[in-house]
Image (cartoon, rainbow, N blue to C red):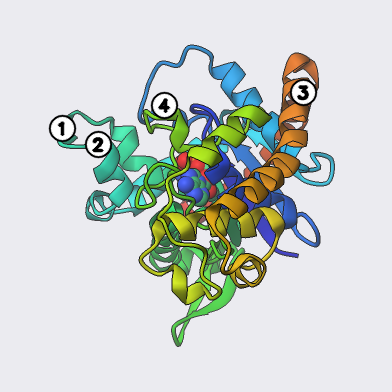
Amino acid sequence: KELVFSGVQPTGNLHLGNYLGAIRKFVALQEGNDCIYCVVDLHSLTAQLVHDDLPGQIRSIAAAFIASGIDPKKHIVFNQSAVPQHAELAWIFNCVARIGWMNRMTQFKDKAGKDRENASLGLLAYPSLMAADILVYRGTHVPVGDDQKQHLELARDIAMKFNLDYQEHIRRAGRGIDITVGDEPVHAYFPMVEPLIEGPAPRVMSLRDGTKKMSKSDPSDLSRINLLDDEEAISKKIRKAKTDPDGLPSEVEGLKGRPEADNLVGIYAALADKTKTEVLAEFGGQQFSVFKPALVDLAVQVLSPITGEMRRLMDDTSHIDAILRNGGERARARAEATMKDVRDIIGFLY
Ligand code: TYM
């Protein structure tokens, strides 16, 4: 059994990129794996300190997980701040990671913008908390969108440096596993995390500009489909989505240099659990005037039951709160087992 871990920030509305890049994969991975899905509320303070309704935002992400089909009895759904061990391990990882590694993160550079001196220290340390989220469960597989790839490479670097620097201590504590890295045998405590990024829509693009990522922060609401959009909004946004004048090609190669067409085909494929090749076998040679209505139908068919269930779950907060409380307890027990080992390895008395 693999240990799957992933997280979503409780900031703004969830959109189709979050759903196809992450949540839909969370659902698929439940079969045959041990999964932990987290609402990363500590992360949400890194870019904006004060939130009007953080409890509501946390509940809405948990509701999206459940409405999409995650089973909180078989797996764990919780919010990060309920398990203080995440922050405890993150502190240790802050001492493992090098400032230079953090400075190279493209997401930090983007989010900090020009005024880097004025970004929060938390924004710089963001990837180290992310590594702690996964490794406090000794997680091995992490389903995410393409934008998180660099952060997961950093998580591997942090795990590797910890394993190497503490190799002797890990041996002494008797809690390690033997792994090989390249050809080198290493007595390790933390596993090497594997990002799960593949699929037809690892990076869903804006509906207004096929070269920009679909994102919560785009000022134009027409650029994204929100998970809480109704049928009418979905239909309007897809009908208005930017395209080029040509019809659809019959092979994937024909999508090169056509970012908007590529994006819509990728979205269709992901929603239908097909490959782009299969979608083009069906729609190759057709105009967007045919493809777009088919995409609207499919998007509504997949998303509207989720939207309805999310709204229903958010009407009665007690159900979601009970799920989070129960998930938090189970997560805490597992995270504490790891932290006991880590404190032993480092040499803390407790
Ligand atoms: P967040 O909250 O920004 O996004 C949640 C997930 O949605 C994916 N995503 C996309 N996928 C495809 N196309 C898009 N346009 C798109 N936009 C967002 C993200 O890749 C992500 O998988 N750092 C993470 C949260 C996090 C985490 C973790 C993830 C914290 N700790 C540990 C994995 C493991 C983030 O900000 O996601």
Answer above or below: position of 288 versus 314. Answer: below
User: Mark 1 and mark 2 in contact (Cβ < 8 Å)?
Assistant: yes
Say which amino acid is labelled 4.
Leu
Residue farthest top in this picture: 52
Q: Residues within 10 Å of mark 4 (few under 14, many from 20)?
A: some
Mark 3 = which residue? 313
Answer above or below: position of 139 versus 208. Answer: below
* Secondary element at tag 4: helix
Residue farthest bottom in this picture: 183
Mark 4 = which residue? 45
- Estimate the spatial distance between the alpha carbons at disc 4 and disc 1, rounded to whole Å: 18 Å
Q: Is residue 158 visible?
A: no
Residue 78, numbered circle: none
Q: Is residue 218 left or right of residue 250?
A: left
Residue 115, numbered circle: 1
Q: Position of residue 47 (x, y in %)?
A: 35, 29
Which quadrant is the N terminus positioned in? bottom right
